Amino acid sequence: GVPWAWSVESAGVLARDMAAIEAAFQATAQSGDVVSVTASPRLRALPEASLGHLTDDVREGYREMCAALGAVTGPPVDALAGVGPQWNARMKELHPVHSLSMLAHGERYSACIQARYEDWGGVTREAYLASFEYEARLDAEIARALDGHDALVLPTSPLTGLRWGEWPGEPPFAWFRFCQPFNMTRQPAITAPWRLDGEGLPICFQVVGRRDDDERLLGVARWCVERTGFDAGVVSPQRTDAMPA
């Protein structure tokens, strides 16, 4: 695969259902069995106002999700609001990784990524080191939010999914604003679809557990997914229309 930034790189599994994710985890992780969750897990939701801009569909879906899963809203994780600049500083690690490729095959990179590449090259040493101080503060806040709870729940993205073969005008990393924090702090997270919006694009949620407690998070995620009522076999109309016959 394409090298990523070493301090936030993580490996994950894309699968149609939780059974496949659990099987992949047990086959690759030197760890214990998935923790079976039979009673309602203690889920902590983050205040909607603390999440910044959400599309109307994502906001409505988040409210539905919290109600259906019985998630209790707790205090905000204030450091989440500052993840953008800190993530950009951490991307300095990507600049040397891609420098030779950019010189030889720069035309293969989109204009947007080329611009980000230039930004990453300009990140100062001080800003890069400061991102690790931010990481420590964020990690402590997430740990406090999880205290007495099994997992955090929040949208996977503030926006709905992308249309097949189309990239709207939003900056590319805008989709990942709720994923970046947990890549930085290395808490395990699992994403699942909640429902499709009016245009057939997915609205997803994620559950986030404690670091090194993947087995329990898998059990919590299975419990949550079983209550979504989402048909894993559904195909977005946007994708169907765009795919060749």
Image (tube, rainbow, N blue to C red):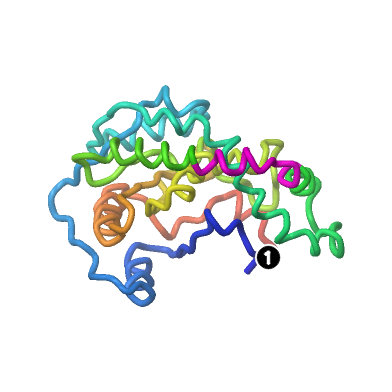
| Res 219 quadrant in image | bottom left
- Percent position of residue 31, x then y: 28, 71
Magenta residue check for 187: no
* Span colored in magenta: 119-132
Q: Residue at x 63, y 39 (%)?
A: 126
Is residue 236 shown above or below 65? below
Residue nearest the viewer, comparing 71 with 150: 150
Is residue 99 shown above or below 57? below
Residue 14 in sight here: no
Magenta residue check for 131: yes
- Percent position of residue 223, x then y: 24, 53
Image quadrant occupied by the N terminus: bottom right
Residue labelled with disc 1? 245
Q: What kind of residue is marked 1?
A: Ala
Outermost residue toward the top?
49
Q: Residue at x 75, y 42 (%)?
A: 122
Q: Main secondary structure of the magenta part?
A: helix
Is residue 37 shown above or below 147? below
Q: Residue at x 48, y 37 (%)?
A: 134
Element type where label 1 sits in the image: loop
Residue 221 in sight here: yes
Taking the image as shown, residue 114 lies to the left or right of residue 71, namely: right
